[in-house]
Amino acid sequence: MGALNIANVRKAYGPVEILKGIDIEIDAGEFLILVGPSGCGKSTLLSMIAGLDVPTSGSIHIGERDVTYLPPKDRDIAMVFQSYALYPNMNVAQNIAFGLEMRKVPKAERDAAVQRVAKMLQIERLLDRKPGQLSGGQRQRVAMGRALARDPKLFLFDEPLSNLDAKLRVEMRAEIKLLHQRTKVTTVYVTHDQVEAMTLGDRIAVMKEGVVQQFATPDDIYARPATKFVAEFIGSPAMNMLTVQRHGSAVSVRGIDLPVTDEQQVALARATCAEVIYGLRPEALSFADSGLPGSLKMIEPTGPETYATVETGVGDLTVRVPGYLRSHVGDAVHLQWKPSDSHLFDATTEMRLA
Amino acid sequence: MSSMNSSPLSPGRLTVHRVLLWGALLVFAAWFLSPLYVMLVTSLKDMNQVRDGSLLSLPTAPTFDSWSKAWSSACTGIECGGLKPYFMNSVMMVVPAVLCSTAIGSINGYVLSKWRFRGSEFMFALLLFGVFMPMQVVLLPMSQILGTLGLASSIWGLILVHVIAGIPSTTLFFRNYYVGLPDELVRAAQLDGASFWQIFWRIVLPLSTPIMVVTLIWQFTNIWNDFLYGVVFSGADSKPITVGLNNLANTSSTVKEYNVDMAAALIAAAPTLFVYVIAGKYFVRGLTAGAVKG
């Protein structure tokens, strides 16, 4: 059994089902991301792992232990909250030591733990300050320090970076990653940011409306999204989605045939739906001398790469090209892509075909 | 760009505006302070000057005789021991009553805001009912209960009545203040292994100073100034200062000693005045703090 095992967890508030049977298992030392739009149930699930809420049915194991109904303090976990939740009446050192004090750890050991954690997070100079005197990034660090001091079996993060400005967010993201590489504590991290999910996670559970849409490694999620929702949610700019007609093992839209691989042809022949969603990531498309004709509708340079919107016979497509694009709006262009870069989803069930 | 003349901040307008403002404020202050002034100067006059009838004149020969008489030898009915025993009764009543009602209010508020349970909102609504209930309604049932408990006509009975009567408002104060404290603080403390009481003592209570001061002042003023419960539920030797003052002012021999009455009234009002002066700034700060924090 893994370090964390969530089995068929359901949660309902009256007739409203928040979680509809969640199954997730991760190994010791893994970094699990729960990602999804607001209201998908990811924070509720985290609360249950923390013991701040109990599931309506199902079980949660940490290591070999069934913790489904254990109070938070008996679970050997630590959590970093979105608002950091530092105790405003205590200084940084007291904040970090509070959990140890509550567990009756002797003073000398507590002090040693505070020093160890402060050194690791480079907050030694801040130990005497009150949380009110700290900046956002410093508070974030203290909150992590408080969680680290106890050497927990499981580390929980609840959208810890969403209160920081963009630059600091990237810095702290890198720090969390380094920290995890160093400590190797099993971690569950909730976020709605797909970049955080992709950069930090060993495994990602993409959630929507109380259901895990896909639970896989970042590579898998990106290369083989299991549903249309996952395909759209992960990746920026979002994947181009074309609703196309299926004719046996071929697909077309407005009379234009779209290329598919042999494998996809087999899947299409087996499918039952009349319509299929044909997905193409913006970076799968490239400009060429021949291919799908169209005209440039909009150009968005970001510096290292440029996003171009192209009006074509099959609809508007976003193209991502490296560097600067030496073209103008209105220019006639041709788009090419490899059939193997396309993703096919059943238009009715929105499940991946191939 | 508006012209200098029409700007409300231009120097000319500012002066007139300021003079009017200060003038109005001074008039109001004089108006509201005049009773206090009359009480103070009358209490320092001797009876000859009081009989002259010029209410606003300063005492020609200031004397504290009427203060000492009011304190220790004025007659309140057939006894002539001044206000001193009543004052002591009030102190013995007010200290435990204020501390108990505030303590219970803060625990109630903590539970109703941070440990909600099925029906806790309904409990809170019922408690709110208690805030608006007129005191007279409980007089008869309460006297029966005190009789049953064997606390009738005693200081302890009065304390109990004031604690119970104070709980709705103290709970309301603390509950509304604690709603503004982030729930995540309590959750973080739970994960840190702190118990219900440890969270209360170590985290919630240290953050409660402003509302604590407000509640203490509020309860002190209400209980010290209460007359109704004091006159209904007290016995011969447990009457509070308000009842004592009433008896003193209503006991007249041949002549009405206004100077003694005034001194007695000032003695009765002194503790609440004192509390407002030392803690008044917290009071204003505390009453508005919750509103700003949301």
Image (spheres, coloured by chain):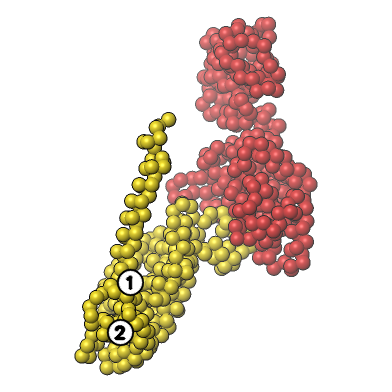
Chain colours: A red, B yellow
Label ID, residue B46: 2
- In the image: residue B55, left or right of residue B104: left
Q: Residue at the location (67% across, 30% down)? A: A222
Q: Position of residue B242 (x, y in %)?
A: 32, 80
> Which element is circle 1 on?
helix
Percent position of residue B165, x then y:
36, 72
What residue type is disc 2 on? Asp
From where the camera sits, is residue A132 visible? yes
Pick the front one: B182 or A34 = B182
Relative side of A125 to A318, left or right: right
| C-alpha span from label 2 to label 1 | 16 Å
Residue B37 image label: 1
Choose between B247 and A100: the one closer to the eye.
Answer: B247
Tell me the SS state at disc 2: loop
Task: Using the image, determine if residue A36 lies above or below residue B231.
Answer: above
* Callout 1 amino acid: Tyr
Residue at position x 52%, y 52% in the image: A56
Spot occupied by residue A275 in the image (x, y as percentages of width and height): 52, 20
The crowd level at tag 1 (other Cα within 10 Å; few <14, some 14-19, many 20+) is: some
> Is disc 1 on the same chain as disc 2?
yes
Sequence-wise, the earlier of marks 2 and 1 is 1
Q: Which mark is residue B103?
A: none
- Chain letter for mark 2: B
User: Along the line of sight, which residue is nearer the eye, B149 or B3?
Assistant: B3
**Chain identity of mark 1:** B
Q: Dividing the picture into quarters, in which one does residue B258 lie?
A: bottom left
Residue A39 % position (x, y): 52, 41
| Extreme residue toward the left, this view | B254
